[in-house]
Amino acid sequence: MLTGDNTETANYFASQVGIGKVYGNLLPQEKLDWIEKLKSEGKKVCMIGDGVNDAPALKTADVRVAMGSVGSDVAIEAADIALLGDDIGKIPYLKKLSNSTLFTIKANIIISMAINAAAIVCSVLGLLNPVTGAIVHNAGSCLVVLNAALLYDRKFDDSIKKNRYRKCGT
């Protein structure tokens, strides 16, 4: 955890969510230096920030998340993702949703290509005329759109949050 906040405060919050390494009292340039160092080691870096002082580090990170309601306009503009609320506990949900979205995109590409390949083979064999080919193509498009729609309002197991509360003794 890299933060410009007081180290003792940062250690407290890091212990609440299970973060082991904490670097506090950092200036914006120091955060940027850390992110560049981590990236030079081949690591993927996610930066979560809310202020003007986080913008340079946000722009350098691989994944950039701004805390929307308390975040400055500069931080929100520098981010890939802006959380509408200030609940950092949504980050595990964001990760799961991102993974699910990528899986769905890949599956939709495979489904679409398979339907189109089958339609081409059927057309060459004379089993599909232009009208039935168009119907098959549109049905495939509808299938892909419906599959993508399953991402809407996706609920994931909240075991991370449960484990965090268990550590806190609540």
Image (spheres, rainbow, N blue to C red):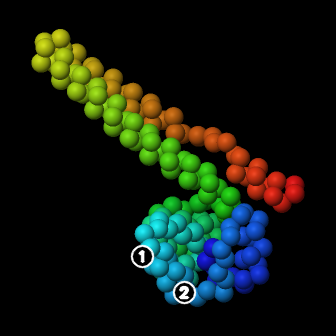
Q: Residue at x 45, y 32 (%)?
A: 147
User: Which image quadrant: the C terminus?
Assistant: bottom right
Coordinates of residue 36 in the picture (x, y in percent): 45, 79
Q: Amino acid at mark 1?
A: Ser
Residues 123 and 23: in front is: 23
Coordinates of residue 30 in the picture (x, y in percent): 54, 86
Count residues near mark 1 (Cα–Cα under 10 Å), then give few for <14, some for 14-19, many for 20+: few
| Residue underneath mark 1 | 40
**Circle 1 SS class:** helix
> Residue 104: which quarter of the image?
top left
Residues 167 and 54: in front is: 167
Coordinates of residue 94 in the picture (x, y in percent): 57, 53
Is there any visible trace of residue 73 in the rendered image?
no
Asked whether, in this view, residue 141 is left or right of residue 12, the answer is left
- Kindly give the residue lying farthest to the right in the view shown: 169
- Kindly give the residue lying farthest to the front in the view shown: 41
Q: Residue at x 13, y 14 (%)?
A: 125
| Residue underneath mark 2 | 30
| Disc nearest the viewer among 1 and 2 | 1
Q: Residue at x 64, y 81 (%)?
A: 23
Asked whether, in this view, residue 33 is left or right of residue 71, the answer is left
